[in-house]
Image (tube, grey):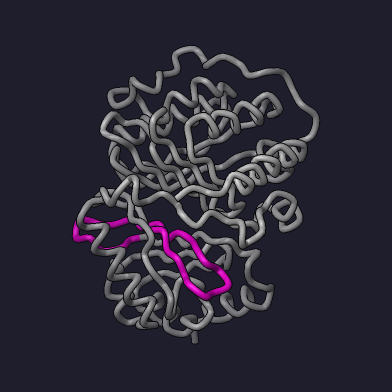
């Protein structure tokens, strides 16, 4: 379903208000850098980072074609070229949702208007750059960083859940990030009220195209977490696995310690307990992740990104959700649960 017109209008008014957060406007959009591949030409090129960004893109759990596509996408985005950027999206079926702000864009044109509004105001040295890519050209997760003054006065470290059509065009993109890292006051200036968030994240239009292996792991992990069974969850992790929760600033190594943490923190973590469900799975046999929903819980949605080894064991799990939806004590408790004795 789509949002009522008044809710879409409200979200777009919020965008225009939020555009002022970035400070004074700068010159209009620039052209693509020399040699930048077009949106339709990915697959056989090189994976290149955004000019001026020194971070090495982690593509160890992604196929080459999707890595090239995202490297071209973010180079085009950082070049502040809305028309070039929108060439990456399917004109007939584009859906973008910011799962933290609650901003929905249910058409190519609405998303075009978003970028056309923001990009002319971006700082000349502002960038949006990929950090880590998981998946293939059917569906993927991409971690990326927006520098400050692109969408507000703080940097934004996000994970995008992305689906593609058979022609390699983006049909669905949902962003997850921690509002505390962005700044609670900054977030509240633009976030929709909870009852105005989109109810439909449009996963039904993309369908479940993720590889069988990552779907099986995602469903098994979600079931173990829903049941509070840390031992069962630990059995899904490889020997040198890493568990990390971004809002809680927790990192745990090895299945024994991961299982113990998931058991002790089962009543506090937002992606455990009754009401937990898998919304949508993306990725390949190397990695991807799943969006989850938690009915009746303080944090109603989030993402668990997964890296897998050749035996479909989890080598890295990264949990991404909005930390502003819980109080400080909840985050302190999550940290305390990680203390080993």
The answer to which quarter of the image holds residue 292 is bottom left
- The front one of 110 and 297 is 110
- Residue 313 highlighted magenta (yes or no): yes
Q: Is residue 255 above or below residue 51?
A: below
Q: Residue at left 43%, top 76%?
A: 275
The answer to which quarter of the image holds residue 126 is top right
State the image coordinates of residue 65 (x, y, percent, origin top left).
Answer: 30, 32
What is the residue that sits farthest to the bottom in this orientation?
Answer: 341
State the image coordinates of residue 250 (x, y, percent, origin top left).
Answer: 53, 68
Q: Residue at left 38%, top 38%?
A: 171
What is the residue that sits farthest to the front in this orientation?
Answer: 5
Q: Is residue 277 left or right of residue 85?
A: left
- The front one of 178 and 210 is 210
- For the image shown, how many numbered marks are present on the structure? 0
Q: Is residue 139 left or right of residue 23?
A: left
Q: Is residue 48 visible?
A: no
State the image coordinates of residue 77 (x, y, percent, origin top left).
Answer: 54, 28
Q: Is residue 171 left or right of residue 179?
A: left
Q: Residue at left 29%, top 27%?
A: 43
Q: Is residue 154 visible?
A: yes
- Residue 198 highlighted magenta (yes or no): no
Q: Residue at left 27%, top 64%?
A: 217
* Magenta stretch in the rendered image: 290-315
- The front one of 137 and 339 is 137
Q: Is residue 170 above or below residue 293?
A: above
Q: Is residue 277 above or below residue 57?
A: below
State the image coordinates of residue 260 (x, y, percent, origin top left).
Answer: 41, 82
């Amino acid at each position: 379903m789509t949002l009522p017109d008044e809710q879409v209008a409200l979200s777009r008014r919020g965008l225009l208000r939020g555009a002022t957060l970035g400070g004074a406007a700068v010159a209009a959009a620039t052209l693509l850098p020399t040699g930048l591949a077009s949106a339709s030409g990915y697959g056989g090129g090189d994976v290149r980072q955004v000019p001026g960004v020194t971070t090495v893109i982690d593509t160890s759990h992604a196929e080459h074609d999707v890595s090239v596509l995202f490297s071209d996408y973010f180079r085009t985005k950082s070049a502040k070229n809305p028309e070039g950027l929108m060439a990456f999206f399917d004109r007939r079926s584009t859906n973008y949702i910011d799962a933290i702000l609650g901003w929905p864009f249910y058409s190519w044109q609405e998303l075009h208007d978003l970028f056309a509004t923001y990009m002319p105001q971006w700082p000349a040295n502002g960038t949006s750059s990929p950090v880590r890519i998981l998946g293939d050209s059917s569906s993927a997760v991409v971690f990326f960083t927006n520098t400050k003054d692109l969408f507000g006065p703080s940097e934004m470290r996000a994970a995008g859940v992305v689906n593609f059509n058979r022609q390699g065009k983006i049909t669905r993109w949902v962003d997850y990030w921690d509002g505390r890292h962005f700044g609670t006051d900054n977030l509240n200036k633009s976030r929709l009220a909870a009852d105005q968030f989109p109810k439909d994240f449009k996963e039904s239009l993309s369908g479940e195209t993720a590889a069988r292996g990552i779907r099986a792991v995602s469903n098994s992990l979600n079931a173990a977490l829903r049941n509070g069974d840390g031992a069962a969850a630990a059995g899904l992790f490889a020997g040198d696995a890493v568990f990390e929760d971004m809002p809680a600033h927790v990192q745990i190594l090895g299945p024994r310690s991961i299982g113990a943490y998931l058991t002790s923190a089962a009543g506090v973590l937002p992606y455990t307990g009754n009401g937990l469900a898998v919304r949508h799975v993306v990725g390949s046999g190397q990695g991807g992740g799943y969006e989850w929903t938690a009915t009746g819980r303080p944090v109603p949605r989030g993402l668990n990104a997964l890296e897998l080894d050749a035996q479909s064991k989890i080598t890295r799990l990264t949990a991404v959700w909005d930390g502003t939806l819980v109080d400080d004590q909840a985050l302190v408790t999550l940290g305390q649960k990680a203390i080993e004795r």
